[in-house]
Amino acid sequence: MNKPKVFVTRHILESGLRLVMDFCEADVWPGELPPNREEILNHVRGQQGLLCLLTDRIDREVMEAAGPGLKVISNCAAGVDNVDVPAATARAVPVGNTPGVLTDATADFTFALLMAAARRLAEGERQVRSGAWKTWSLDNLLGADFSGAVLGLVGFGRIGQAVARRACGFGMQIIYSDPNPNVPPDQNRVRTNETRIKAKRVELDTLLRESDFISLHTPLTGETRGLINAAAFAKMKPSAVLVNTSRGPVVDQVALFEALKSHHIFAAALDVTEPEPLPTDSPLLKLDNCIVVPHIASASWRTRQNMSRMAAENLIAGLKGEHLPNCVNPEVYSRSKQVPN
Ligand code: DGY
């Protein structure tokens, strides 16, 4: 029996690659860098499945290039802002993602960034490496305290709640804002998975004004693009530390640069930027109070193996005509296929 043909836009880890190679005739992009636009359009032609990464823009043109035989798009990430999901839905093509398995790794790393920015870890390391550190002193690289500080979580889904659980251990006060009515309502004790924690739902404005630490955990949508802009920075405390592990465009980077340079806020740490990678001459990289790392919040061995496996399972389920284990547009299963002109 002929195996279904798929395009895999980059090497995924062994746990997923093995499943894909066993079940499919796979064209796996061999490059370390993502395929460019033209390469995606060429390689996707005639494929029944597409397994892609968050670096690939999968829009209507790509789906058209694949043709009517395209049965599934499996994104190896929790976020799907790189995929035009409505265009896929209009073609009755299910889109898969990999939520859940990266919650703990991302929450852990969020804390690493909060601490690194607040306690000036990167500055300290540069001091030592450059020989600028001459002796221990009482006032070298003073930073912010965690205990008793207010942590504001913008977005209180799985990852935001996991960060909140960690923050409890540090004795922080937690407030959160989330436009999604399905997240826990305004109450003093919030049940997050197995744990009950003290956290209060507030308006975004209140969160911006009252937080010592602000951490972003919202998907990138039309509403959240540029959410943290000049007006938002104007409301923050001078002691505020901002961490972004969501998506780069949620923060207006020009406004961020101004806020950091003028010390209107204390520090920032970015796992995600716009674009990625940030050009090496970006003004943000010249600031001592800004840490930028290469989108690695979920980069633990176990997590990336699990993401790869889940992406493969979504792909294979779609090729078999089964419901994807993790599907972001389940409405495709209740509508007939209509390919728009
Ligand atoms: C995601 O999955 O959306 C993260 O940004 C990368 O793990």
Image (cartoon, helix red, strand yellow):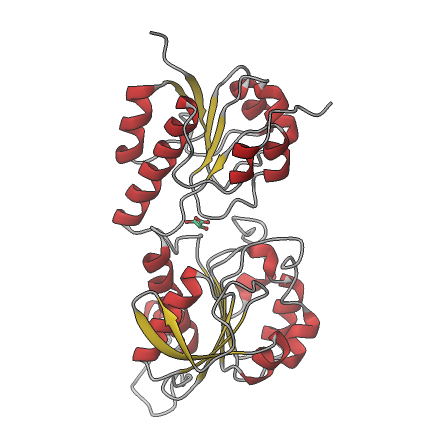
Q: Quadrant of the N terminus?
A: top left
Front one among 52 and 277: 52
Front one among 200 and 236: 200
Q: Quadrant of the C terminus?
A: top right
Quadrant in the rendering for residue 324:
top left
Kindly identify the residue that appears in the image at 33 percent across and 67 percent down.
129
Kindly identify the residue that appears in the image at 36 percent across and 57 percent down.
103
Where is residue 134? Give x, y as percent. Answer: 32, 81
Kindly identify the residue that appears in the image at 38 percent across and 75 percent down.
132
Quadrant in the rendering for residue 273:
bottom right
Where is residue 181? Give x, y as percent. Answer: 56, 65
Residue 133 visible somewhere in the drawing? no
Residue at the extreme bottom: 138
255 is higher (above) or lower (below) than 1: below
Kindly identify the residue that appears in the image at 28 percent across and 42 percent down.
305
Residue at the extreme top: 1
312 is higher (above) or lower (below) than 79: above
Residue at the extreme front: 334
Front one among 243 and 69: 69
Q: Is residue 50 left or right of residue 316?
A: right
